[in-house]
Amino acid sequence: MNLPGKIAILGGGSWATALAKIVLSTQDSINWYMRRPEQIEEILQTKHNPNYLSAITFDINRITFYFDINAVIEASDTLIFATPSPFLKQHLQKVTTSLEKKFILSAIKGIVPDENMLIADYFNTFYGVPAENIAVISGPCHAEEVAMERLSYLTLACSNIGHAEALAPVFNNSFLRISCCQDVTGIEYASVLKNVYAIVAGICHGMKYGDNFIAVFICNAISEMRKFLNEVHVLERDITDSVYLGDLLVTAYSRFSRNRTFGTMIGKGYSVKTAQLEMEMIAEGYYGTKCIYEINEKYKVDMPILDALYSILYEKKSPVTVIRKLTETFK
């Protein structure tokens, strides 16, 4: 496989917009799929995505836009998926062209609901894409800071390390550093769990727990993540690497974190439903909590933080009562 070939971004949100900026910093042109023709028309007229990271200006002569997912797949070699995980199936249900000879790069930090499958496993199982032609990109990298070109770090993971290394130059620019590894499964699970833990951090923040407590919470969260990853995917990994611990830290602390924001609203007394309605963007951790909780019914890893959040989000337990009980398990 000759990587990267023609690159396509699939998605119209903030992370997709940031990825378009990144890829255009190293490539002459890209294909860009969005499901709404009117969004494409707005970008063509204004030269920026009006709803997401509008400060980024694009040279539209270097972008070919598509609202037909089959057309963009046929015209591209490397497909970078950057849609919210709850909507991935909805997009892919329209696909009639083969994905088997495409290279799939998932920038989705979530799990496919209902199937409770990681993104890489979903493409492999349902679309016949070989595992060695599926990669994930993750790390402590908020789209808003990419827009401002603040130095950030990402990790590319693929079972075929050569493919990851071939893709790395696409993302390596003046404000972004790339590392490569083979821990596709571990990184995908970690990217889901960090959203889960960020919601809990937000709940605690909303309830006026201070920095001292949040630091202890993060220590317990990374310990819980390590136990889960070691159980579901045995592999030599350093949990303190930025793609694991760094991503957890930035998602739990940053003002740009939608999961932390969602949790903060709940901690301040909003109902789960009201918080969701007032959020302008999707908090992936809401869906990830249920998925990981159900997956863990098989593995039975001791995960008190996950269990606590599940009881708040899905069993309507009192955040005050649940968090107070959770604090008693920390050290």
Image (spheres, helix red, strand yellow):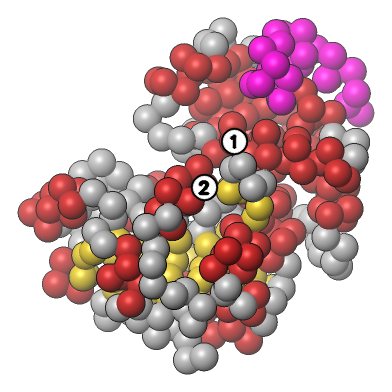
What kind of residue is marked 2?
Ser
Q: Nearer the viewer, residue 200 or 254?
A: 200
What kind of residue is marked 1?
Tyr
Q: Which element type, helix, strand or loop, lies under badge 2?
A: helix
Residue 71: horizontal and vertical position, in percent?
28, 70
Residue 234: horizontal and vertical position, in percent?
87, 63
Q: Quadrant of the C terminus?
A: top right
> Which residue lies under the disc numbered 1?
287
Residue 113: horizontal and vertical position, in percent?
59, 43
For marks 1 and 2, the one nearer the N-term is 2
| Structural distance between the alpha carbons of marks 1 and 2 | 9 Å
288 up-or-down from 33: above or below: above
Is residue 60 visible in the rendered structure shown here? yes
- Give the dominant element type of the magenta stretch: helix, strand or loop: helix
| Left or right: 59 as drawn, with respect to 140 | left
Magenta segment range? Answer: 309-331
Q: Is residue 319 magenta?
A: yes
Q: Nearer the viewer, residue 162 or 176?
A: 162
> Which residue lies under the disc numbered 2?
85
Q: Hey, which residue is sitting farthest bottom in the picture?
A: 2
